[in-house]
Amino acid sequence: MAPSPQDFDAIFDNLIADRTDPAALRKRVESLEFVLERSFTIPGINRPVGLDAIVGLVPVLGDIVTAAMGAYLIWEARNLGMPQWKIWRMIGNLGIDTALGAIPLAGDAFDFIFRSNTRNLRIIKRHLDKHHPGTMVVEGRARER
């Protein structure tokens, strides 16, 4: 017998105490996006990359793993109650990244350019800023000398 969506919700309720809290959700999705897209810097060119590009170098399995991790962002957006059209847009971003990232060599280069998780985080942040303004974080840039 296949598990129902309610079974998965019960599991995550036990794992994540503040699952429906918008501020906690914002921290979770920002952290995951950082790990997937910007957690390492390539020496010499100072280009940030994350697990999406690095694990994506492993044929097939790497793309499946990073797609599953990117799908978690979409699952969090669904739990937040975002509109269906935003969810579908996020699915489209992840689908493009997964499909083109699966192409040998060219897909690996594509993973360095197209950052679906960053795009999806931006969609979530805009929704949070509009519908849950208490979670908004003012992000400033450090002055470069």
Image (cartoon, grey):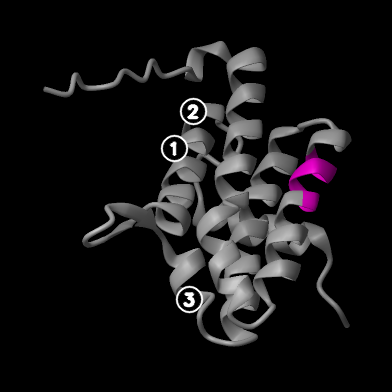
Q: Secondary structure at mark 3?
A: helix
Total number of numbered discs in the rendering = 3
Q: Residue at x 62, y 62 (%)?
A: 11
Mark 2 vs mark 3, CA separation in Å: 29 Å
Q: Position of residue 99 (x, y in %)?
A: 75, 69
Q: Residue at x 75, y 59 (%)?
A: 96
Going 46% across and 54% down the picture, which residue do you hit?
A: 37
In this rendered view, identify the residue nearer to me: 63 or 111. Answer: 111
Position of 84 with respect to 21 (left or right) is right
Question: Tag 1's secondary structure?
Answer: helix
Tell me residue 91's x, y (percent): 78, 51
Find residue 13 and name its label. none
Disc 2 target residue: 23
Instruction: Please name the amino acid that badge 1 sits on.
Output: Lys
- Identify which residue, 96 or 36, lies in the foreground: 96
| Amino acid on which disc 2 is placed | Ala
Q: Which residue is mark 3?
A: 55
Separation of residues labelled 1 and 2 (CA atoms): 7 Å
Q: Which residue is mark 1?
A: 27
The span from disc 1 to disc 3 (Cα, nearest Å) is 23 Å
Residue 50 x %, y %: 41, 61
Residue extent of the magenta highlight: 87-92
Examine the image and state in which quarter residue 77 appears: top right
Q: Is residue 4 left or right of residue 142?
A: right
Q: Nearer the viewer, mark 2 or mark 3?
A: 3
- Residue 140, by quadrant, is top left
Q: Label 2: state its secondary structure.
A: helix
Which callout, 1 or 3, points to the residue nearer the camera?
3
